[in-house]
Image: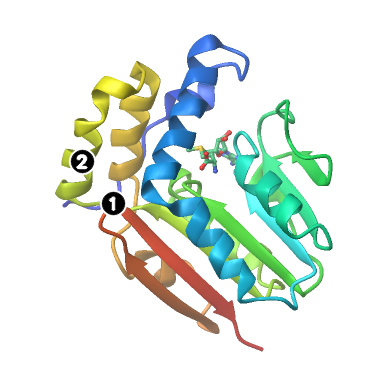
Amino acid sequence: MQSRELVTEWLDVLPADHVDAIRSRRDLEMINFFMGNERWILRQLELWPEIDCVVELGAGTGQLISRLSEKFPEKSCIAIDLIERPAGVAAGVEWRRQDALDFQLASGRTMVIANLFLHHLPTAQLAKLFTNISAADALICVEPLRTRLSLTMASLIYPWVNAVTQHDMIASIRAGFIAGELAECAPASWQWDESPHPFGGLRSVAKMLP
Ligand SMILES: C[S@@+](CC[C@H](N)C(=O)[O-])C[C@H]1O[C@@H](n2cnc3c(N)ncnc32)[C@H](O)[C@@H]1O
């Protein structure tokens, strides 16, 4: 496929309490379930017992960070998103309503996670974001895989999702990544390990080496 193409996703401009936005966020939970993204991220975190703090960028409904906070109550859990704290986010989660690009990570023993978020950013902004979070121990993320097969698979679930999700699925795949593209935005000292998943996700673990 062609290079990345970014267009505005409808979910990003609808008010968070709009009925179509609420439905689309629920669709996303269903898509995440089928892609297995959250289960995979939770499994990765089990491999990093030394981590004290987890920061999720673009946390959406807060479902993933809430699960995490309940599973690892000893870790501090921070969620970042442009929207206000949604109802139902676990009490142990600190919700920060802010642009992820303004987030600066000061200390280590921290894991940054992102699920279906990084593709919102143009390549130059990704490089800035990665620099801002360089003090973390690692970044774990799942992003749409930019392939024709992903587009075909997305169209197969049209009957079960609303118009916002239909639009944003295609937009996010076109803005997504193929293997190697995310790593190119990262500082050279990061060790990037990624694998495409058959259900259309590019799963990455990036370790920040000292
Ligand atoms: C496709 S949704 C994914 C949400 C969630 N991670 C999930 O998997 O269900 C992308 C999320 O990123 C948020 N977002 C978009 N641009 C952002 C930015 N610059 N800073 C912080 N959050 C942003 C949106 O509000 C939205 O909740």
Q: Residue at x 61, y 20 (%)?
A: 16
Mark 1 belongs to which amino acid? Phe
Residue found at x 57% / y 79%: 207
> Mark 2 or mark 1, which is nearer the start of the sequence?
2
Q: Which residue is drawn at 43% across and 48% down?
A: 119
Quadrant for residue 91, please give it. top right
**Circle 2 Cα neighbour tier, 10 Å, few/some/many (<14 / 14–19 / ≥20):** few
In the picture, the disc for residue 199 is: 1
Q: Is mark 1 on a helix, strand or loop?
A: loop
Q: Distance between the residues labelled 1 and 2?
A: 8 Å
Of the four image quadrants, the one with ligand 1 is top right
Identified at 42% across, 30% down, the residue is 8
> In this view of the protein, which residue sits in the foreground, 78 or 39?
39
The type of residue carrying mark 2 is: Met
- Asked whether disc 1 touches disc 2, contact meaning CB atoms under 8 Å apart, the reply is yes
Residue 20 falls left or right of residue 72: left
User: Relative to the observer, which residue lies in front, 84 or 98?
Assistant: 84
Left/right of residue 182 with respect to residue 70 in the rendered view: left
Residue 176 point in image, percent of width and height: 34, 50
Instruction: Let me know if residue 142 appears in the view.
Output: yes
The residue furthest front is 71
Image quadrant where residue 209 sits: bottom right
Cβ of disc 2 within 8 Å of ligand 1?
A: no
160 versus 189 height, above or below: above
